[in-house]
Image (cartoon, rainbow, N blue to C red):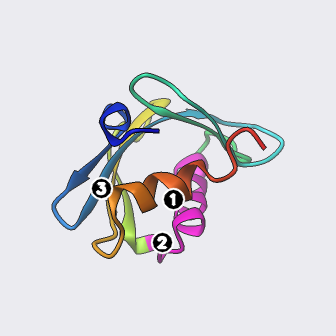
Amino acid sequence: MPATAARNWCSPHADGFRLAVQIQANARKSEVIAVLDDALKIKLHAQPIDGKANLALIAYLATLLKLPKNAVSITHGHTAKRKLLAIAAPHLTLEQFEQALLAGLGA
């Protein structure tokens, strides 16, 4: 995927990246399922109650990117299906960041 096409859902920012996601909670397992025009669609194995899905999202992304959980934060959309995240990963290039997120897509 060319970097220009990915800029809609993923873009470099400060010491890392901004990531737009659309969440589907209560899934059988957590996984990246699609790239939409403006968001990465992710299924989460967590209920959208008391912030459980937000915590699951942070943990899932941290695991995918091999980062500590405190490197991933939700900046907008805490109670919405669409969220904007800030991810501190200055050691990754945009291409490496995209590859890590999309590694399991279509598998």
Residue drawn at (40%, 73%), measured in percent from left and top? 70
Residue 52 percent across, percent down from the top left: 60, 51
Residue 11 percent across, percent down from the top left: 28, 46
Label at residue 69 = 2
Q: CA distance from mark 1 to mark 3?
A: 14 Å
Label at residue 79 = none
Q: Are marks 2 and 1 in contact (CB under 8 Å)?
A: yes
Amino acid carrying mark 2 in the image: Lys
- Helix, strand, or loop for circle 3? strand
Amino acid carrying mark 3 in the image: Phe
Residue 96 percent across, percent down from the top left: 44, 62
Verify whether residue 60 appears in magenta.
Answer: yes
Verify whether residue 40 appears in magenta.
Answer: no
Instruction: Specify few, some or many for label 3: CA neighbours under 10 Å numbering under 14, 14-19, or 20 or more.
Output: many
Direction from residue 59 to residue 82 in the image, left or right: left
Please say if 48 is above or below 60.
above
Mark closest to the chain's N terminus, 1 or 3: 3
Direction from residue 90 to residue 80 in the image, left or right: right
Mark closest to the chain's N terminus, 2 or 1: 1
Residue drawn at (48%, 74%), measured in percent from left and top? 67
Q: Main secondary structure of the magenta part?
A: helix
Report the residue marked by disc 1. 58
Please say if 62 is above or below 75.
below
Mark closest to the chain's N terminus, 2 or 3: 3
Quadrant housing residue 95: bottom left
Report the residue marked by disc 3. 17
- Point out the stretch of residues depicted in magenta: 52-69
